[in-house]
Amino acid sequence: MKQILAVYLLLINLTGFFCFFSDKRRARNHAFRISEKTLFLTALLGGGAGCLVSMYLFRHKTRHLRFVLGIPLLTVLWIWICLRIFPLL
């Protein structure tokens, strides 16, 4: 079970990372954008850490309060969930 969760979290965080990266590139090129709902949904499904890293690495959505507060909150929520399911001790 731990391995399945670890693989899932790795994949969803990579997805979140590349969603923010792709949306930033699309914004620069004035192309069709990824919706904010999709970005938040990726974080809500467990990809918050990847979204957070990408958000600050590419300086994307860092001026939007809902992202500055929401993405870290969802990341902490997933950390809490994982620790409740699989305690460290």
Image (spheres, rainbow, N blue to C red):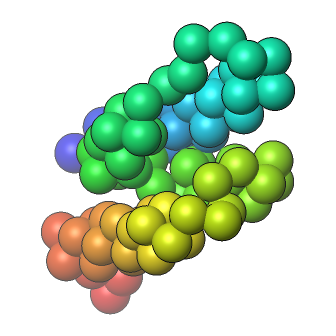
Viewer-closest of 30 and 20: 30
Residue 25, image x, y percentages: 77, 25
> Residue farthest to the front?
30
Q: Residue furthest left?
A: 85
Residue beneath the point at 73% across and 17% down: 30
Is any atom of residue 11 visible in this view?
no
Quarter residue 37 falls in = top left
Which is more toward the observer, 1 or 59? 59
* Figure check: 51 above or below 82: above
Q: Residue at x 79, y 54 (%)?
A: 59
Q: What residue appears at the point 36 percent right and 82 percent down from the top-left corner?
A: 88
Q: Position of residue 56 (x, y in %)?
A: 75, 60
26 relative to 32 in the view: left or right: right
Residue 57 locus on image (x, y percent): 81, 54
Question: Horizontal and vertical percent for residue 45?
Answer: 28, 45
Is residue 15 visible in the rendered image? The answer is yes
The answer to whether residue 37 is above or below residue 49 is above
Q: Nearer the viewer, residue 73 or 68?
A: 68
How many discs mark residues in the rendered view?
A: 0
